[in-house]
Image: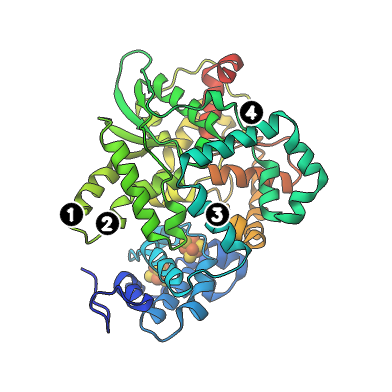
Amino acid sequence: MKAPAPDDPTGFTNPAAALFRDAHEGANRCIQCGYCLPVCPTYGSMGRETQSPRGRINLVKAAAEKRIDIAGDMARPLDLCLGCRACETACPVGVPYGEIFEAARNATAAATPGTPGPGHRLETLLLRHLFPHPARLRATGNLVWLAQVLGLRRLAFRTGLPEKLFPALAALGKVAPETDSPRRRPTPGSVFPARGKRRARVAFFQGCVMDALMHRINRLSIELLREAGCEVVIPVGQTCCGALHSHRGMRAEAIALARRNMAAFETTGADVFVSNAGGCGARLHETDHLFAGDPDREPRARRFARKWRDLSSVLDELGPLPLRRECTETVTYQDSCHLRHVQNVSDPPRRLLRAVAGDRYREMRGAADCCASGGIYNLLHFDESMKILDPKMHAARDSGATVIVTTNPGCHLQMRLGIDRAGLGDRVRAVHLAEILAECVWDNDHLRG
Ligand code: SF4
Ligand code: SF4
């Protein structure tokens, strides 16, 4: 039971009261031990207490008690938090940093509505007008593919204009993998039969960016699930998971998206729901948190949340995959923070990689440390993000790996950017786990087809 707000029993009428209701009790659990500081990437890169988990928790507590101003004192340090939740794993007394962070972001959004600036406009465009609309996203993905086929993408970057207009977006756009033909995008409503004996029926989550621009990874994930004995359903009506909305203080939008996904997945009759994106899977895995305290919706949301599994866990459990080729490259793995710290999945991807690479699998120093992609953090705070990404590339180089494997589209893109910035592009590539597994199960023709 949450503590009542000091001057507002409903906790709905002002941001500080809502913050008190949603975060004060959790923040009060902090015993100030500082065990979370060494694992915090922003404390490591900025070296200030206010950019550490403990510092942020203290700011939230002070703002909830109206000792400091939400917009003036709390907003900026919370905005610079990656939301990676490594601090939550490190905390010995179970401070629920994820809940505190989301409550703080909600309070900031309420206290600073319509903050102007290019970052805010980009956020509004992506989170309100693009990500919740699968048809618009697919149309955007199709345009990107067309521009790629016509050579316009390369031409645009040759003019240098994208870098001048949108430097962060251009940096990521430049290293983005080529988009596959829209004809090969898995269609909602499709049912893909299991290969061999059916062992499970799974409903597959396509995501927003993955579906629009990286749907080849979705297609390979579906093929791998079929190979492992799963009948795969693509639910109609599914939409963006709402993770970015939650992290940016757009709680109402996150709830609306969760309701659409619940309606889409619940009727599939699937044994489990599968995501191949660590960040999306984490949001869906915690859907019940969005409905906490709502007696009508929370039990249903909890049932929905419990059915989510990451692709790597399902393949690991149903394996081994029928490997037809040996991986001859040296492989390492970069954890997705939300897969590791929220879904508690860190061994299955590594087991799957050891199965294909054997002793050519190398553990990278600091593999569990955030890469600073942070959803759209790298777009909104490019310089801060690069201060965390660049040292990680030293660790990647030291591992001797020629393939860096990830399990989340944001990390995947960030690794590609890091490789480019470190000048490793001629000998190191970044791939999603599904891609490297597929390379060892099928020949090139099958992968292209
Ligand atoms: S979520 Fe990550 S960046 Fe934010 S305070 Fe915790 S460890 Fe630091
Ligand atoms: S580890 Fe937990 S209790 Fe210790 S300072 Fe960090 S949040 Fe507080």
Location of residue 61 (image quadrant): bottom left
Mark 2 lies on residue: 291
Amino acid carrying label 3: it is Leu
Residue pointed to by mark 1: 296
State the separation of the CA atoms marked 3 and 4.
Answer: 40 Å
Residue at (55% x, 66% y) in the render: 80
Mark 3 vs mark 4: in front: 3
User: What kind of element bears circle 4?
Assistant: loop
- Residue receiving disc 3: 125
Q: How is colour applied across the structure in the image?
A: rainbow
Amino acid type, callout 4: Glu
Q: Which of pointers 4 and 2 lies earlier in the amino acid sequence?
A: 2
**Secondary structure type for disc 1:** loop
Which of pointers 3 and 4 lies earlier in the amino acid sequence?
Answer: 3
In the rendered image, the vertical position of residue 144 relative to residue 436, given as above or below = below
Please identify, in this view, whether the residue under mark 3 or under mark 1 is nearer the observer.
3
Q: Answer yes or no: do the residues labelled 3 and 1 have beta carbons within 8 Å?
A: no
- Viewport quadrant of the N terminus: bottom left
Q: Position of residue 160 (x, y in %)?
A: 80, 48
The amino acid pointed to by label 2 is: Phe
* Tag 4 residue: 329
Disc 2 is placed on an element classified as loop
Label 1 neighbour load within 10 Å: few <14, some 14-19, many 20+: few
Which label's residue is closer to the chain start, 4 or 1?
A: 1
Number of other residues with Cα within 10 Å of mark 4, as a class: few under 14, some 14 to 19, many 20 or more: some
Q: Please tell me which residue is depicted at 65% across the width and 42% down the height of the picture.
A: 416
